[in-house]
Amino acid sequence: MNIGNLLNIINTHVPFSSAESWDNVGLLLGDENATISGIMTALDCTEEVVDETLENQCNTIICHHPLIFKGIKQITQEDGYGAILRKIIKHDLNIIALHTNLDVYPKGVNAMLADKLELINQHILNPESLSYYKVQVFIPKDHLIEFKNKLSAAGLAEEGDYQYCFFESPGNGQFKPIDGANPHIGELDQISSVEEYKLEFMIDYNQKQLAQQLVIQHHPYETPVFDFIELQREADYGLGMIGNLEKPMNAKAFAKHVKDKLKMPSVRFTGTLDDSIKTVAIIGGSGIGFEYDAINKGADIFITGDIKHHDALDAKISGVNLLDINHYSEYVMKEGLCGLLLDWLDDETTDFNIIASQVNTDPFVYL
């Protein structure tokens, strides 16, 4: 399997388009035609992770945090990131980043954290809104089946695992061609009545231009009548998870539970230690800004990382329980992503290992 094949498979499960617009995901460094000799999953791509990858005879690193994120002005041996990039290029390694697209994936980082904390009845905390179009086309009965076949063959009118998803209703269409018209049906200056069908189907937001081209191309009328109606629905992916503990416990006991399950040297709490915790919301990384939404959705505590002093103080004054598990808690994605990749590649012929990095890339030392 080469890198291009792997990227296509990943994209079907964790679409790169679902990443935030400011993010940098996909193949950051490497060659889509390169054959994969082994995959190393990592939270961060440090020089130690690169060395570990080479020691395990892997040529591909899939990391959560993009190595190339801010602007890089130079690549020199003396520069920290430059040294990493030079080593990657020297050894023909491939670097793939799955960042915010893995965050919003239903089985992604936040689900992995929720599983570690043994939450049950999990569901997405903040589902994304998905824009799409309902298309309406009016077409004569005799051309209906062929027209639908053309649209379906182009990948339109699909819903999940279903194809050929059309609704049609009969009616009578009237029109009168005038000077300059070249009617497929009817005569100039004569009102024609035709048995037509109103055909309705759904398309993805990015399929509008394709649908319009196909309707014009395959509709028998010189001037087809059709509409695009923009709609929104809740997507099956989004940021954060919310779930329940098997049994309630107070906030102090819950903080210890989190430390034990995530094997963390320390956590930070603000709120009321005696509060009973049953419903838990979590956003890995830096999720401040969603704490009040989480509480409004029934959470007794909101877990995230990188909580600043004033955000913590505001929450405490508002009676909101926060637990800071720091950004490195996302390390759970290393093993979790190995499992996802094994599932995604289950039907593929592979002759390489998928290994979780053992390097601790937490930049902090806890004293």
Image: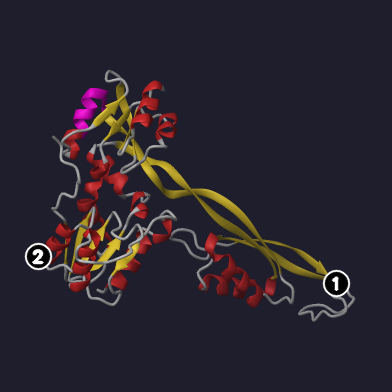
Image: 189 above or below 342? below
Instruction: Please state which of residues 281 and 201 is positioned toward the viewer in this rendering.
Output: 281
Question: Is 248 within the magenta?
Answer: yes
- Residue 320, numbered circle: none
Q: Residue at x 24, y 50 (%)?
A: 333
Q: Residues within 10 Å of mark 2 (few under 14, many from 20)?
A: few
Please name the residue that numbered disc 2 is placed on: 55
Quadrant assignment for the C terminus = top left
Image point (16%, 58%), residue name: 49
Front in this rendered view, residue 136 or 92:
92
Q: Measured from the top left, where is residue 59 in percent x and y?
A: 19, 69
258 with respect to 302 (left or right): left
Find the magenta span and give its range: 247-258
Residue farthest to the right? 189
Considering the numbered disc 2 on the image, is that residue within a helix, a strand or a loop?
helix
Name the front one of labels 2 and 1: 2
Q: Amino acid at mark 1?
A: Lys
Q: Quadrant of residue 149?
A: bottom right
Q: Residue 303: x and y, percent?
A: 31, 35
Where is mark 1, residue-wise? 176
Residue found at the far left of this picture: 55
Quarter of the image where the N terminus is located: bottom left
